[in-house]
Image: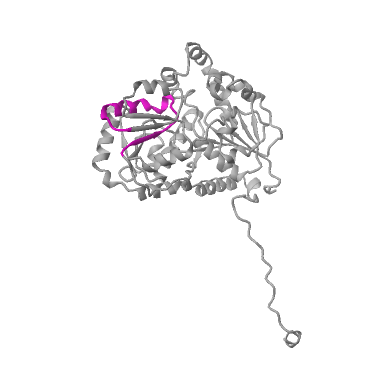
């Protein structure tokens, strides 16, 4: 039995909706494919979302009713499992598609509902980077650290059991596919996330500053860039906010400017004019290097993780191999000596390999092949319906018709 968009009940889920970063941009593309699907989430701040997501029906967990939940949700991590068990679906869906970098895959849904998880990452703070989260996060006080240590085993067990209920995983990179196998013992299909090509021009003039656009949290390792540029004395602009902002400001010399969170037009200006974009952390994929390349900027990135899947070393960027300030500073100096090798056109061409249209096409192919009964007859909203035109016959006298 086949279904179409008028009869197929689809539910979407996303860990939290408080910013408009890479994960939310993936969710926007899922919304284009399933325009009537509700979105289930732990916490939401609707005014911070894109127009596409603001139009959607958001089903927010009881966690969202806590005062300032959008600011303090990370401190409520031990509550996530019990809250998700209480987040009831209004209608039993025929298909569930989760977009997850936390434990949202543990949403309460009926057994027998097909469930595909687009996994941005198994949660780092529960698995391979728990120690880093505890040591470097200034967002946790002593009580918070104790609570995390006391509940982290329970949270990992919840995440593991939630992963067992997922029918199919889609990974946003081969790096994440490897982590899914390591953490959950599950295979996955890689579909890289999309970048908004229309939002950037690659033909603007360059200025003498380097750029970071990032959430300022421990695993992003922005401290490496601050230390490297303290030594280099070159201008670095850092856009973003987070738990590490004040500590990084205190660490930085005057050549490093912190602009905080900024609207899209400010991001666009800096992407299009920076000398190069920096990514010092090990990302699962990282949408910001692709945004930089869409704007024609070369990328200097740590040579592990998702960056090696989006940046072409020697053509659209350079990698540094040791995750320390000296290695990053050496990469910047090396980049400046060979800057003539990098072109805005090459960066833009690389970014075009990750277009939203290609992302949706790959996801549709995956769903058709994996669930033919559900999707072989589904009328995808992003595909134009063939227009049926009635062409009138050429007029002819009745006598001519009779003669024929």
Residue 115, x across and y down, in percent: 61, 36
Pick the front one: 199 or 85: 199
Q: Quadrant of residue 12?
A: top right
Residue at 50% in and 30% down: 185
- In the displayed structure, does residue 338 sit left or right of residue 358? left
Residue 358, x across and y down, in percent: 50, 49
**In magenta stretch: residue 395:** no
Pick the front one: 110 or 83: 83
Is residue 403 placed above or below 357 in the rendered structure?
below
**In magenta stretch: residue 215:** yes
Highlighted range, magenta: 208-235
Is residue 63 placed above or below 355 in the rendered structure?
above
- In the displayed structure, does residue 1 sit left or right of residue 243? right
- Look at the image and name its color scheme: one colour
Quarter of the image with the C terminus is bottom right
Residue 320, x across and y down, in percent: 30, 34
Residue 110, x across and y down, in percent: 68, 31
């Amino acid at each position: 039995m086949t279904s179409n968009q008028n009869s197929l009940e689809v539910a979407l889920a996303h860990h939290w909706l408080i910013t408009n970063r890479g994960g939310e941009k993936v969710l926007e593309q899922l919304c284009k494919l399933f325009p009537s699907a509700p979105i289930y989430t732990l916490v939401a701040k609707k005014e911070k979302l894109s127009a596409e997501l603001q139009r959607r029906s958001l089903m927010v967990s009881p966690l969202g009713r806590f005062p300032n939940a959008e600011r303090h949700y990370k401190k409520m991590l031990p509550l996530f499992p019990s809250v998700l068990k209480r987040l009831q679906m209004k209608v039993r869906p025929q298909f569930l598609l989760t977009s997850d970098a936390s434990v949202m895959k543990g949403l309460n849904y009926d057994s027998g509902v097909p469930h595909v998880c687009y996994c941005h990452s198994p949660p780092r703070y529960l698995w391979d980077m728990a120690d880093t989260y505890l040591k470097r996060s200034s967002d946790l006080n002593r009580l918070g650290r104790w609570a995390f240590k006391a509940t982290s085993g329970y949270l990992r067990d919840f995440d593991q059991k939630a992963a067992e209920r997922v029918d199919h995983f889609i990974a946003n990179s081969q790096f994440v596919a490897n982590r899914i196998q390591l953490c959950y013992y599950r295979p996955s299909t890689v579909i890289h996330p999309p970048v908004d090509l229309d939002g950037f021009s690659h033909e603007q003039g360059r200025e003498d500053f380097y750029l970071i656009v990032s959430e300022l949290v421990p695993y992003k390792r922005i401290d490496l860039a601050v230390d490297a540029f303290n030594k280099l004395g070159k201008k670095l602009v850092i856009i973003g906010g987070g738990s590490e902002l004040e500590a990084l400001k205190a660490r930085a010399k005057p050549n490093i400017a912190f602009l905080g969170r900024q609207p899209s037009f400010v991001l666009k200006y800096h992407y299009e004019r920076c000398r190069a974009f920096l990514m010092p952390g090990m990302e699962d994929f990282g949408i910001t290097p692709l945004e930089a390349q869409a704007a024609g900027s070369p990328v200097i990135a740590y040579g592990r993780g998702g960056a090696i899947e989006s940046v072409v070393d020697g053509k659209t960027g350079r990698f540094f191999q040791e995750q320390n300030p000296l290695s990053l500073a050496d990469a910047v100096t090396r980049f400046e000596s060979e800057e003539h090798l990098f072109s805005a056109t090459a960066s833009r061409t690389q970014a075009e390999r990750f277009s939203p249209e290609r992302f949706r096409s790959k996801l549709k192919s995956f769903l058709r092949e994996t669930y033919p009964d559900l999707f072989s007859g589904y009328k995808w909203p992003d595909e134009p319906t063939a227009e049926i035109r009635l062409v009138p016959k050429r007029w002819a006298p009745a006598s001519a018709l009779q003669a024929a």
